[in-house]
Image (cartoon, grey):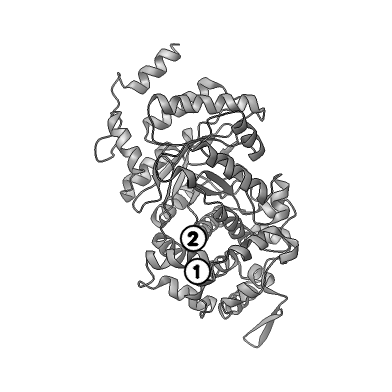
Amino acid sequence: MHLSHSVADTVWSFRDLKDVLAKASPLRSGDVLAGIAATSSEERVAARMCLAALPLSTFVDHAVIPYEDDDVTRLIVGLHDAAAFAEIAHLTVGDFRDWLLLDATDTATLSRVAAGVMPELAAAVSKLMRNQDLIAVARKCTVVTVFRNTIGLPGRLSIRLQPNHPTDDPMGIALSMLDGLMYGAGDAVIGINPASDDVQALIRLWHALDEVRERFEIPTQTCVLTHVTSQIAAIERGAPIDLVFQSVAGTQKANASFGITLAMLGEARDAALSMRRATVGDAASANVMYFETGQGSALSANAHHGVDQQTCEARAYAVARAFRPLLTNSVVGFIGPEYLHDGKQIIRAGLEDHFCGKLMGVPLGCDVCYTNHAEADSDDMDTLMTLLGNAGVTFLMGVPGADDVMLGYQSTSFHDALYLRSLLGLKRAPEFEVWLAKMGLADDAGRLVDAAVRNPLLLDFASRWPS
């Protein structure tokens, strides 16, 4: 497949579909590092004009990574919903952008076509959109999931309470959990990135989390973010596991670098479903998976096949979509400046990721974050999380002080969630709002109140750690 476009008497040629997708991407350091980025602004504009003219059927007929070489491609093709696609099949990529922005293209319409949107198509249309377009369309996309509470409802913002500790110290984890719960965080999940990979040590963490959740009847779910094989082994030993976590990527080779296969994810989902721990909806078909992704993961593993990092990221959402997760989030600035150099690139990537995931019907949250050697700071993160809040992001991270002492990066804090909810009038998951009021931590409107000295959370903590 050879593509070309003429601009001001210059004919720009592109080798194939993945070449035009890469050249049409906004400038980012990862694509430059891979040697696939546009070499000038003129070439980038020509690629976008070429892309805008392509029929949507191009993405059905031409795989960016060959079918026979990649199981993610086979997954995308095998699960593509032709009936859902039929509603938009007559459009070009440029027409699709215009259609998405129409007032008549509402939440119900977008939900109806989501299963027909292939990831490469979502990536393609995002490359033609300004930031405001990405926000406006994503805001219309509603993806609701359930486990012990209901996540993703309009006008709601959930928070993952992330009580990491560099040595998995129980008191350190408990302090962070207490801090987050007192600030009304934790309705998405209480999830620990553990320091250890020893299964028995991990099982102790699962039991500790579950003990707190049961003691206070917290309507949320817990997770220990370790490798999927360790979680399967822990389920076999009877560990109280709610959600199975795994980082996923958009190519078979990149997933292999994580030590996973699609079959392994299916086995993990079956194992989690066998626990029947969900209380909202049907426990036999619950949303039991939690996935994390991030632009640059395929390139960092030398597993991108010449595909640009944002298109690879959208393909990761196809992997997530296949397993019906409760939560999926892009850890947008975590891989480092080699892939997203500065605040501007991180902001754009976060908006792209959220748009593509929601358009495809994935419950997309974001870890609004950066590494300490990136050309970014907390002001950039304030900008991104405020834009994502307006775009209807499903959930964000809650890290004590926004500084993760386990993983050594900068994220968002419990205070950031308070700011965003106050600014935009966003509520928590409804079941969690009721619990906060019951515990005396919030009023009936969901506003936090000064916790009394005799609050049961504080009293329990004091009795266990009297020092």
| Residue holding disc 1 | 129
Q: Position of residue 107 (x, y in %)?
A: 38, 64
Disc 1 packing (10 Å; few <14; some 14–19; many ≥20): some
Q: Can residue 243 be seen in this view?
A: yes
Q: Name the one closer to the observer, 378 or 388.
A: 388
Q: Name the one closer to the observer, 252 or 173.
A: 252
| SS assignment at label 2 | helix
Disc 2 packing (10 Å; few <14; some 14–19; many ≥20): many
Q: Name the one closer to the observer, 268 or 415.
A: 268
Q: Is residue 387 left or right of residue 11?
A: left
Q: Is residue 434 left or right of residue 165?
A: left
Q: Where is residue 129 in the image (x, y as percent from the top left)?
A: 50, 69
Quadrant of the image occupied by residue 71 = bottom right
| Residue holding disc 2 | 355
Q: Is residue 338 visible?
A: no
Residue 96 vs 284, above or below: the answer is below
Q: Where is residue 163 in the image (x, y as percent from the top left)?
A: 51, 31
* Amino acid at the residue labelled 1: Met
Q: Which residue does the image show at 66% across and 71% down from the upper left?
A: 40
Front: mark 1 or 2: 2
Q: Are marks 1 and 2 in contact (CB under 8 Å)?
A: yes
- Can you name the residue that lies furthest to the left here? 444
* Amino acid at the residue labelled 2: Phe
In which quadrant of the rendered image does the N terminus lie?
bottom right
Residue 237 vs 333, above or below: the answer is above
Quadrant of the image occupied by residue 104 = bottom left
Q: Where is residue 69 in the image (x, y as percent from the top left)?
A: 75, 62
Q: Is residue 78 left or right of residue 146?
A: right
